[in-house]
Amino acid sequence: MAELQSLARPYAKAVFELGRETDTLSAFSTALTLLSTTASDPQVAAYISNPRFSRADSAKLIIEVLGARLGGRGQNLVRLLAENNRISLLPAIAAEFEVLKAEAERRVDVDITTATAVDDAQKQALSAAISKRLSRQVAVTWNTDASLIAGAVIRAGDLVIDGSVVDELTQLRHALTA
């Protein structure tokens, strides 16, 4: 996984910089989402990895499937990736691009998992507190997991705040057995 990210990062950075320079980040985001979905399709992935078909054939297939929705720059990206045998990196490139785009837009996706359902007032208060703490606009995805017993686990990129009772019990067990 880390290797895929390392290979995808330079492509994502180049696309991001081009998108920022030409004010087309949103268009690139849409194109990369389409490309990622297409490249992840099992039939397309099988075609791309089949040695009987050339890299140019792979590019041609994707360009024909997505057509005008890609635009000229998107098609050029597909050709470049095919030429370098990197089409399979499209999902990782799209993910890396979205991280760069979110950073530039000063926003972050946050996953909050609670033991029980949370009412709207608590959701708004917690979202506002996280936004203030991270100094970013947040897009929160709410989940419930009864195995937490009580409390919540907050994930925002690499940041994890575990305020669940399960975590506290685990820490207590380690402290008592150490």
Image (cartoon, rainbow, N blue to C red):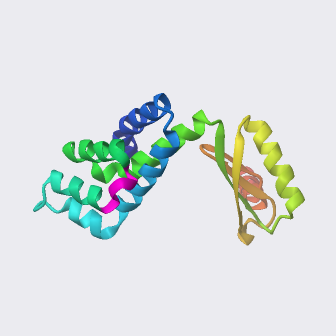
- Which residues fall within the magenta stretch? 65-70
Q: Relative to the observer, which residue lies in front, 130 or 79?
A: 79
Q: Left or right? Give the position of 18 relative to 102.
A: left
Instruction: Please determine whether, in this image, residue 84 is positioned above or below residue 70.
Output: above
Q: Relative to the observer, which residue lies in front, 52 or 60?
A: 60
Q: Tell me residue 54's x, y (percent).
A: 13, 55
Q: Residue furthest left?
A: 52
Q: Is residue 69 magenta?
A: yes
Q: Left or right? Give the position of 96 relative to 121.
A: left
Q: Relative to the observer, which residue lies in front, 86 or 116?
A: 86
The residue drawn where x is 71% and y is 41% is 137
Whether residue 141 is visible:
yes
The residue drawn where x is 80% and y is 69% is 116
Whether residue 1 is visible:
no
Q: Residue furthest front?
A: 68
The residue drawn where x is 28% and y is 55% is 63
Q: Left or right? Give the position of 53 relative to 25.
A: left
Q: Tell me residue 144's x, y (percent).
A: 73, 67
Q: Tell me residue 160's x, y (percent).
A: 66, 47
The residue drawn where x is 81% and y is 64% is 150
